[in-house]
Amino acid sequence: MPSQETLYNVADRVATITLNRPDKLNAWTAVMEGEVRAAIGEAERDNDVRVIVLTGAGRGFCAGADISLLSSVAEQGLDKKRRAQALKNTSVRKVKGVRPDFQRKYSYFPAVSKPVIAAINGPVVGLGLVISLYCDLRFASDTARFGTAFARRGLIAEYGMAWMLPRLVGVPNALDLLFSARMIDAPEALRMGLVNQVYPQDVFSDKVREYARDLALGVSPRSMRVIKRQIYDAMFQTLGETFAISEREMIASLLSEDFKEGVAHFLEKRAPNFQGK
């Protein structure tokens, strides 16, 4: 199915999804939303893909929701039909074996079994920031800028952001970013813990590809899959529950083919050939 507002590419077992409305700083639309979800689903099903990178075309990552949509709602309000549609769009999709928390409109990223990396190549604001928070890792260009925008539009912390943001930057920083809706630069985002690393713009794409390629070719896909599930499930568990699960998962990992390969390639001093089993 041809895409209108995104690009999709696979190389070195890394799927790259590019938001492709550069003239609008990749402002988010319903079309883009559907295409991103379809692309992530395709990458999830493709056994040749082990890592997913989400980035933006041109000089920005995502400027938030398309302002034309916000203008329409501001002028016309939400009638009964629009309210019903808005609630439907945020309802839970029931998928067996996946927490309901990770089945909503944008919170499904943690349920994807493969690592999802946000390559923040420029400004990321509002809804764009929300989407980046649900990615597993965030790398930023030194030209990137970050802002919530919501309070300056008369809005609130959208799509579960009030749950996710404090877990990344702490409550005081989250309240600062949400109350003031001020823009921060990449170094401040790094100090807060909002991003994992900042790279100079001229080497940014190469550095992200290098990291993603290392995960895709040098790390056990099975290990990444299990670890990702452990981390996100642990947000809802006690230490005792997390400990018990880790003991079961350790036994399973010791019986896996990837464990055998992990030991073999180390002893034989060669590149690994993990199969994800």
Image (cartoon, helix red, strand yellow):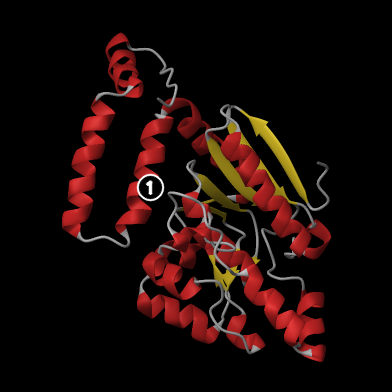
Give the x, y percent position of residue 147. 58, 73
- The answer to which of 217 and 29 lies nearer the viewer is 29
Q: Residue furthest left?
A: 240
Residue that lies at the very extreme toward the top in this rendered image: 268
Relative side of 93 to 255, left or right: right
Instruction: Judge left or right: residue 8 versus residue 215.
Output: right
Between 97 and 243, which is closer to the camera in this rendering?
Answer: 97
Q: Is residue 53 above or below residue 47?
A: below
Residue 42, image x, y percentages: 65, 39
The count of marks equals 1
- Work out whether residue 136 can be spotted: no
Q: Could you say which is closer to the camera, residue 103 or residue 47?
A: 103
Quarter of the image that includes the C terminus: top left
Q: Is residue 243 visible?
A: yes
Image location of residue 213, percent across then percent down = 53, 32
Of residues 154 and 56, the one nearer the viewer is 154
Picture residue at 36% right of the left edge, 72% below the top:
170
- In screen coordinates, is 66 left or right of 192? right
Q: Residue under label 1, please give it.
A: 229
Q: Residue at x 42, y 57 (%)?
A: 99
Residue type at numbered disc 1: Arg
Please, is residue 211 above or below residue 271 in the view? Answer: below
Q: Quadrant of residue 272?
A: top left
Q: Residue at x 58, y 86 (%)?
A: 151
User: Which of the image's four quarters has the N terminus?
Assistant: top right
Residue 132 lies left or right of residue 259; in this view the side is: right
Q: Residues within 10 Å of mark 1 (few under 14, many from 20)?
A: some
Q: What is the x, y in percent for residue 80?
A: 73, 86
- Element under label 1? helix
